[in-house]
Amino acid sequence: MEQYGIGLAPWRVPPPDPRILTASRAEELRDDSGRLLAAVATLLGLSAPIAGDSIRPGRSDAYAERWQAMATGDPLRRRIRRRIVARYADDMLAYGYDPETLAADPEWRPPTTH
């Protein structure tokens, strides 16, 4: 869970030049990589497309399954999960993720800094 806080920490400070900043979530890359990579290539002024053939849509499935199993697992696993949620829930919610299910809110947008 700590990767959520680390990965999202840059949103807490304004970027040096917001005109060159773009934000997306892993779900967007997974679900619509062609569109997203084309937009990034355009933003960067690239003449060639960015290859997306190494993107593996199901890569996080095992992680999500383990997370859900902790909710009904042995008492120690349930306690560990509760502590993780207590520690990171506010950050996850602020960035559009449900700390209980890990589901992404499709309506979430990055906070504006300018």
Image (spheres, grey):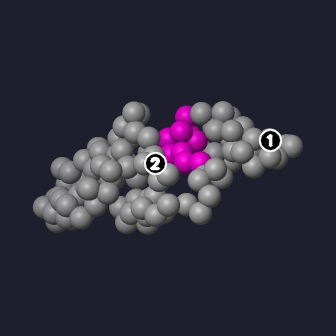
Q: Identify the amino acid type marked 1.
A: Pro
Q: Nearer the viewer, mark 2 or mark 1?
A: 2
Foreground of the two, 33 or 81: 33
Callout 2 secondary element: loop
Q: Quadrant of residue 108?
A: top left
Our reading of the magenta stretch's main secondary structure is: helix
Q: Is residue 29 magenta?
A: yes
Callout 1 secondary element: loop
Q: Is residue 60 visible?
A: no
Q: On residue 60, which mark appears? A: none
Foreground of the two, 77 or 36: 36
Percent position of residue 64, x then y: 37, 48
Percent position of residue 93, x then y: 30, 49
Q: Which residues are magenta?
A: 22-31
Q: Is residue 44 magenta?
A: no
Q: At 41% across and 34% down in the image, what residue appears?
A: 106
Q: How many marks?
A: 2
Left or right of residue 54, residue 101 in this image: left
Label 1 CA crowd tier, 10 Å (few <14, some 14–19, many 20+): few
Percent position of residue 65, x then y: 35, 47
Q: On residue 112, which mark appears? A: 2
Pointer 1 residue:
49
Percent position of residue 83, x then y: 19, 64
Q: Identify the amino acid type marked 2.
A: Thr
Q: Is residue 39 visible?
A: yes
Q: At 25% across and 55% down in the image, what residue appears?
A: 89
Q: Could you tell me how far apart the alpha carbons at marks 2 and 1 are, in whole angstroms?
A: 28 Å
Q: Earlier in the sequence, mark 2 or mark 1?
A: 1
Q: Quadrant of residue 79?
A: bottom left
Q: At 42% across and 61% down in the image, what residue appears?
A: 12
User: In the image as oriented, which residue stretches furthest toward the left?
Assistant: 75
